[in-house]
Image (spheres, rainbow, N blue to C red):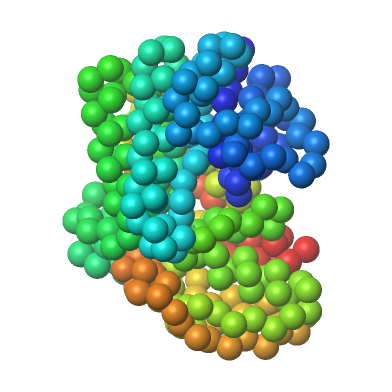
Amino acid sequence: MDRILITGALGQLGVEFIKYFEKSNSFVLATDIKTPKEKLYCQFENANALDKERIDSLVKKHDINIIYHLVAILSANGEKNPFNSWKLNMDSFQNIAEISVKNKIKKVFWPSSIAIFGTESKLDFVSQNPLMNPSTMYGITKLAGEKLIEYYFNRFGLDIRSLRYPGIISTETVPGGGTTDYIIEMINAAKKGENYCCFLSENTKLPMMYIDDAIESAINLMSVNRNNLSISNSYNITGFSITPIQLLNEILSNGFKIKVDFKPDFRQQIADSWPKKINDSISTKDWGWKPKFGLKESIEATLK
Ligand code: AKB
């Protein structure tokens, strides 16, 4: 039986993984530094992923054999305190890796990001392994994590699997402090009948993905035989690409009324160093990746 630990479980991805596993017969222990506002249908413990002893004791106590390590400070928030961002993202990664090796954890899932790419990565259509020059501390920690995934696999046989997520669109739990957050903010403003001031310029194209696809892709990647995986760090993955003005037009064509101003701030520079489109053909080849939600389906589902 899968006995799963989720760290950062009350974040955008975590709550959706909990919902997904509720339908399976896996045991789930959710952990976070926050306390849940609503009842969770799994066990929960307040725990900081920087507290190695505590996480280790929870792994032992609950006989955990799979870990979803989701703790991270995202791109825009990371720039407010880059030292703190490095510490949280890397030290928590290192803790989970060490605990996993010592406790013989079968598999770990760890999200990487399109933030690992940079201006040298041929941003119009980014391949799996271009030059990478991340511009944010978040991107640097994700790239460092990807290198460590390879290292720990070669050194200890630790099986950490990873996807380079684009912006993820969900409404239940919103992300915090990302550069792609405008998409959810604009949709939520439209739903509340409010106007919105977008922090990216209207033609900034970025890759995105609907939350159901984000969860299903991770589950699929985690379930395939390791021998099928030709990539030993993290897989490119995408749903579709969209600009703020295209999003606005989709919202309007779904019958919502909203006025949007465009006032780019420091996040514009981050977005300008990120891919416009992602080539995820190796994911399709290796483990059958195919998004279920395109641009229209994702926006419609989120507006509902
Ligand atoms: C962010 O905007 O920082 C994240 C990401 C693309 O990893 N959503």
Instruction: Tell me the residue at 23%/20% (across/down).
Output: 155
Instruction: Tell me the residue at 67%/88% (across/down).
Output: 259
The image shows residue 57 at horizontal and vertical percentages of 53, 16
Image quarter (top left, top right, bottom left or bottom right) of the N terminus: top right
Image: 251 above or below 81: below
Q: Quadrant of residue 169?
A: bottom right
Instruction: Tell me the residue at 47%/29% (across/down).
Output: 51
Image: 38 above or below 24: below
- Report the side of 45 relative to 158 (left or right): right
The number of callouts visible is: 0
- Front residue of 31 and 25: 31
The image shows residue 268 at horizontal and vertical percentages of 40, 76
Instruction: Tell me the residue at 19%/56% (across/down).
Output: 131
Evaluate whether residue 176 shows in this view: yes
- Front residue of 30 and 83: 83
- Front residue of 291 and 167: 167
Image: 170 above or below 192: above
Q: Quadrant of residue 282?
A: top left
The image shows residue 152 at horizontal and vertical percentages of 28, 25
Evaluate whether residue 125 shows in this view: no
Image quarter (top left, top right, bottom left or bottom right) of the C terminus: bottom right
- Report the side of 214 relative to 237 (left or right): right
- Front residue of 218 and 16: 16
- Report the side of 287 relative to 40 (left or right): left
The image shows residue 211 at horizontal and vertical percentages of 61, 51
